[in-house]
Image (cartoon, rainbow, N blue to C red):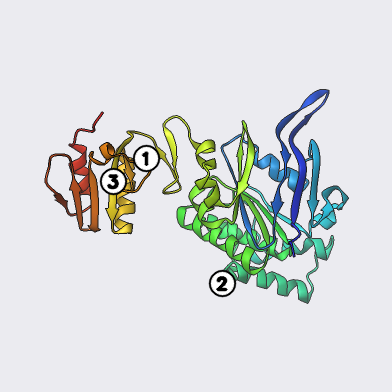
Amino acid sequence: MQQTPAIETSGLIIGYLQKSKAPVILHDALQLHLFAGEMTGLLGLNGAGKSTLLRTICGFQPAINGTVYINGRLLSDYSHSELSRIIGVILTEQTNAGGMTVYELVSLGRQPYTGFFGVLKAEDKRIVAESIKAVGLTHMADRPVSELSDGERQKAMIAKVLAQQCPVIILDEPTAYLDVTSRIETMSLLRRLAVEQQKAILLSTHDLELAIQMCDCLWLLDQKRPMVCGAPEDLILNGAFKTIFDRKGIAFDSSTGKLSVEKSTFPITVEGDSITAYWVGNALMRNGFRPSCVNDPGMTSSNKSNGSIYCHHPQRISLFLPDTDEIKTGNVAELMDVLRHYSVPS
């Protein structure tokens, strides 16, 4: 039996309405699906329309045309009160919670159920406590939000949305202000909540590597092209990432899932221990070489004669250059030092 999408769009046109002027259209004919139990990432360069799309789906701004369905029902048919129980939203701006504690902040998530006076009943308190526990902040429940790190503060905001008991959670760049460890923790937490609590999670992000690693589906937005959707691996293999993110001097590497500075196209084959070979490839790209596998279809016999590297283990890396015997190096830095003094073929 086919699952009903938590959010579905049909012929959606997004952009900006202008008084006495034609609307500014950013994207049209958007056919999108967001499912429970999945985390979907929205990627695109600045100005591509990511925030506009999120605001339109949430009902914060009107669509220029087309329809948005929430659980099979038109978005326009929902009252504000009903939507607050279905869609939880976390925006990019950093939280200014004044002197509130974590518990008090998360308790605000019960507002759609407690009414104007916000009196928590026993069931509300249980849900707040469970939401705080789900993000790992039970030991900080009584701590002022102002004393939290950026990562802890983002977890508190996620707990607040969990307290709303919304089946759909939408986040606009949830890792924007976080350090690398907190970015990974936040994305891992959201991924876990999608699976374990069957939430439909949609987030915009600039972190390509984490999005590729964590998301079930990606929506790729570009100012000049139609939106592309699919599993991260399919979008890499069919060239969608390269089409959208390649720029002059910057290239998307489909073998690593990373954007890198494009320097020389001089190829050099890398074999052997997989972990060592991966990081040797990383160093090669940084130094203007293009690492390739021996069976890379783009490699010709003349390219292979340019040189090759065999990675026995991190402390033994062999370099083979034209007209030279094996050059043994003891680590990646030593290998790069040898290559820097090698004349790259034109």
| Camera-nearest label, 1 or 3 | 1
Left or right: 285 as drawn, with respect to 104: left
Within 10 Å of the Cα at label 2, are there few (<14), some (14-19), or many (20+) other Cα atoms? few
Q: Going 58% across and 61% down the picture, which residue do you hit?
A: 191
Q: Going 79% across and 35% down the picture, which residue do you hit?
A: 64
Q: Nearer the viewer, residue 219 or 15?
A: 219
Q: Quadrant of the C terminus?
A: top left
User: Mark 3 highlights which residue?
Assistant: 269
Where residue 229 appears, as percent x and y from the top left, is 62, 46
Where residue 265 appears, as percent x and y from the top left, is 33, 34
Q: Quadrant of the N terminus?
A: bottom right
| Camera-nearest label, 2 or 1 | 1
Which image quarter: residue 100? bottom right
Where residue 284 appears, as percent x and y from the top left, is 30, 43
Within 10 Å of the Cα at label 1, are there few (<14), some (14-19), or many (20+) other Cα atoms? few
**Residue 101 seen in render:** no
Tell me if residue 133 comes above or below residue 154 in the rendering.
below
**Residue 100 circle label:** none
User: Mark 1 highlights which residue?
Assistant: 298
User: In terms of secondary structure, where does tag 2 sit?
Assistant: helix
Residue type, numbered disc 1:
Gly
Specify which label sits upstream in the sequence, 3 or 2: 2
**Residue 139 circle label:** 2
Left or right: 256 as drawn, with respect to 338: right
Q: Going 50% across and 58% down the picture, which residue do you hit?
A: 184
